[in-house]
Image: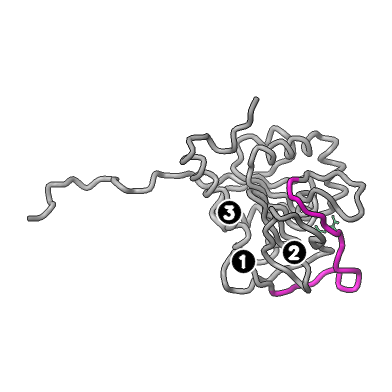
Amino acid sequence: MTDAGTPPGPEGAAPAIRPPRVGVLAVQGAFAEHEAAVAAAGGVATQVRTPEQLTGLDGLIIPGGESTTFGLVAGRSGLLDAVRDRIAGGLPTLGTCAGMIMLADATTEGGQSLVGGMDMVVRRNAFGRQIASFEAELGMPVVGPEPLAAVFIRAPWIERAGSAVELLAAHGGHPVAARQGHLLAVAFHPELTPDTRIHRLLLDMIRRGRASSRDSGTGGERVRAQ
Ligand code: GLN
């Protein structure tokens, strides 16, 4: 006997899920390239210049540029505090180059405003003047077995990291990519190469966060006590 009487239905089909909406901080630096990379990776990108524009985001990118300028400009506008708040609330965030510096709890030299959130100390302009900008192939198993072509521009490295920080890649013996919970930081510029695996990793972190909040019955980000 066949099962012909069973009406075809959407049973078992995955519910339609809208693509993750990722804000790209557009204070300065290479934000247009990040928007294109988010779209290529399957997300929807939107520029963020004000605290209000952080509303309704599933994820965030802090691009490269100059971390001291970013700290000053975003500090004045209130954006820095607002970003800190959203990150403390569990918003999945990728920081690249200067963005990695912003996500660190400290720099070796100190004296600048950071977002913080990752238990690590970074050294700015760590690779020195002679080799200020270069491209290198990185082994980064978390994005797959193929080496990742990484563009470094006056890049930082991770000088020290706490045990909660997962080191994901190194160059010349120095860690240049790390993850701590919902925060992902890379010292290079993944938006400048056609390889979208770093942006896809952020989108995966967003989707995993959604799935675990569905399982635990909370809505989206971690629920904070009021
Ligand atoms: N050297 C910059 C800084 O210290 C970072 C460079 C970059 O983002 N490409 O903030």
Q: Secondary structure at mark 3?
A: helix
Residue 57, picture quadrant? top right
The front one of 167 and 43 is 167
Residue 165, picture quadrant? bottom right
| Residue of label 1 | 195
| Residue of label 3 | 39
Residue located at (70% from left, 59% from top): 178
The front one of 87 and 66 is 87
- Total label count? 3
Q: Position of residue 172 (x, y in %)?
A: 78, 74
Q: Is 123 one of the magenta-colored residues?
A: yes
Please report contact status of discs 1 and 3: CB closer than 8 Å, yes or no.
Answer: no
Q: Is residue 226 left or right of residue 209?
A: right
Q: CA distance from mark 3 to mark 2?
A: 25 Å
Q: Position of residue 12 (x, y in %)?
A: 31, 48
Binning the other alpha carbons within 10 Å of mark 1 as few (below 14), some (14 to 19) or many (20 upward) gives some
Magenta stretch: give its range. 117-137
Comes first in the chain, label 2 or label 1: 2
Q: CA distance from mark 1 to mark 3?
A: 13 Å
State the mark number for residue 176.
Answer: 2
Q: Is residue 24 left or right of residue 204?
A: right
Q: Secondary structure at mark 1?
A: loop
Amino acid type, callout 2: Val
Closer to the camera: disc 1 or disc 3?
Answer: 1
Is ligand 1 less than 8 Å from the beta carbon at label 2? no
